Amino acid sequence: MKTKITLLAVASALLTTSSAFAADAAKGGQLYAQRCAMCHGEKGAGDGPVAATIPEGMKPRNLKEGGYKYATDDAKFKELLQKGGAGVGLSPLMPAQSDLKPADLDNIIAFVKSLK
């Protein structure tokens, strides 16, 4: 009986763990290319074509470095993407991605994590 309970607990934990397991970094890369690369750059170095036009102090974050100011975990990262910079007290130049589905946001997060 104890073994069955343990197996059920493990199975439940696996089903309820972070959505990062289900995230698809390749799909996230496609969305990133469409929505983020213009500022953050193709490889996430903060050097996209629009970055040159942005004033100092508001430049896009170098996503390869990690250590994000706001997105310290997946939930906060997802909130940042959904609300945009202004929605969480960061740069108003980062647009909200509120039209994306939660799985799309998870995929973008998985891709950004792969840049480190």
Image: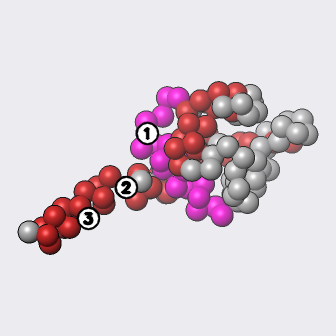
Name the residue: 47% across, 47% down.
Answer: 106
Q: Where residue 93 sits in the image (x, y, percent)?
A: 75, 30
- Binning the other alpha carbons within 10 Å of mark 2 as few (below 14), some (14 to 19) or many (20 upward) gives few
Q: Is residue 105 visible?
A: yes
Question: Which of pointers 2 and 1 lies earlier in the amino acid sequence?
Answer: 2
Please tell me which of labels 3 and 2 falls first in the chain.
3
Asked if 95 appears above or below 62 in the picture, the reply is: above
Q: Kindly identify which residue carries mark 2.
A: 17
Q: In percent of the image, x 83 and y 37: which residue is there?
A: 58
**Mark 3: few/some/many CA within 10 Å (<14, 14-19, 20+):** few
Circle 1: element type: helix
* Cα distance in 3D space between marks 3 and 2: 10 Å
Q: For the N terminus, give its image quadrant.
A: bottom left
Q: Where is residue 82 shown, x and y percent of the image?
A: 55, 33
* Residue corresponding to mark 1: 102
**What amino acid does circle 3 point to?**
Val
Q: Nearer the viewer, residue 22 or 3?
A: 3
Dot 1 amino acid type: Pro
For residue 8, side relative to residue 115 (left or right): left
Q: Quadrant of the C terminus?
A: bottom right
CA distance for labels 2 and 1? 15 Å
On whether residue 101 falls in the magenta region, the answer is yes
Kindly report the secondary structure that dominates the magenta region of the rendered protein.
Answer: helix
Q: Residue at x 58, y 44 (%)?
A: 77
Q: Report how far apart the C-alphas of labels 3 and 1 lie in the structure.
A: 25 Å
Residue span colored magenta: 98-116
Q: Which residue is mark 3?
A: 10
Q: Nearer the viewer, mark 2 or mark 1?
A: 2
Q: Quadrant of residue 95?
A: top right
Residue at the image point whose x is 52% and y is 55% from the top:
110
Relative placement, left or right, of 52 versus 89 is right
Rendered location of residue 71, percent (x, y): 63, 46
